[in-house]
Amino acid sequence: MAANSRVTIAAHALAWLELARRQGREVLTSEEVAASVNTNPVIVRRSLGDLQRAGLVTARRGAGAGFSLARGAEDITLLDVWLAVSPEPLLALHHSEPNLECPVGRGIRPVLSDLYDEATEAFRATLARQSVAAVLERILQ
């Protein structure tokens, strides 16, 4: 199984948009963002579309087309990013019902549900403490 890189691509795009803003460029095209991420612009546009629907970026059409941050980078947390681009739960249970006649199969779902909820809350709390601006500052050190 491959790790979900959607959050990483979105965080990268937002950090690049913030750096460009600091350098006097309010708008970047998806091609410019894709060049930094080193991926296809279609993948970046999909990510930026998710971020736009979440209110984290704005899109400008026509002359001067491109994307910019919808609010300050210090006001966008990595939790905001995760919620915008990662619709699947962090951890998931079996896709099918385990064998309920087996003692492990009968009891694993409620136990893991509780543990996964606890882990997800810790994960969310960590992401909520980190803004895109803070990530960019760490990158630039």
Image: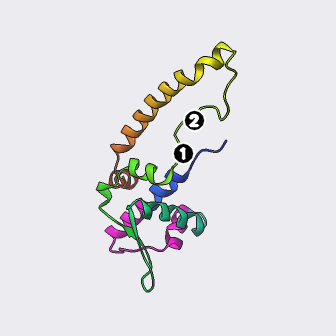
Q: Split into 4 quadrants, where in the image is the N terminus?
A: top right
- Quick check: 107 left or right of 128? right
Question: Disc 1 designates what residue?
Answer: 88
Residue at horizontal 44%, vertical 61%? 51
What predominant SS class does the magenta segment belong to? helix
Residue 92 or 12: which is nearer the viewer? Answer: 92
Q: Dot 2 surroundings within 10 Å: few (below 14), some, or many (20 or more)?
A: few
Residue at mark 1 to residue at mark 2: CA–CA distance:
8 Å
Badge 2 amino acid: Ala
- Image position, residue 38 (x, y; %): 57, 63
Q: Is residue 50 above or below residue 100?
A: below
Q: Secondary structure at mark 2?
A: loop
Is residue 10 covered in magenta?
A: no
Question: Disc 2 designates what residue?
Answer: 92
Residue at horizontal 48%, vertical 57%? 10
The magenta segment is 14-37
Is residue 16 covered in magenta?
A: yes
- Image position, residue 12 (x, y; %): 47, 57
- Image position, residue 43 (x, y; %): 58, 63
Q: Dot 1 surroundings within 10 Å: few (below 14), some, or many (20 or more)?
A: few
Badge 1 amino acid: Glu
Residue 80 or 64: which is nearer the viewer? Answer: 80
- Image position, residue 11 (x, y; %): 45, 55
Assess whether mark 2 and mark 1 are in contact (beta carbons under 8 angstroms): yes
Considering every residue shown, the one lying at the far bottom of the view is: 63
Residue 33 or 140: which is nearer the viewer? Answer: 33
Count the marks: how many? 2
Residue at horizontal 64%, vertical 32%? 94
- Quick check: 141 left or right of 32? left
When asked about the image quadrant of residue 84, the answer is bottom left
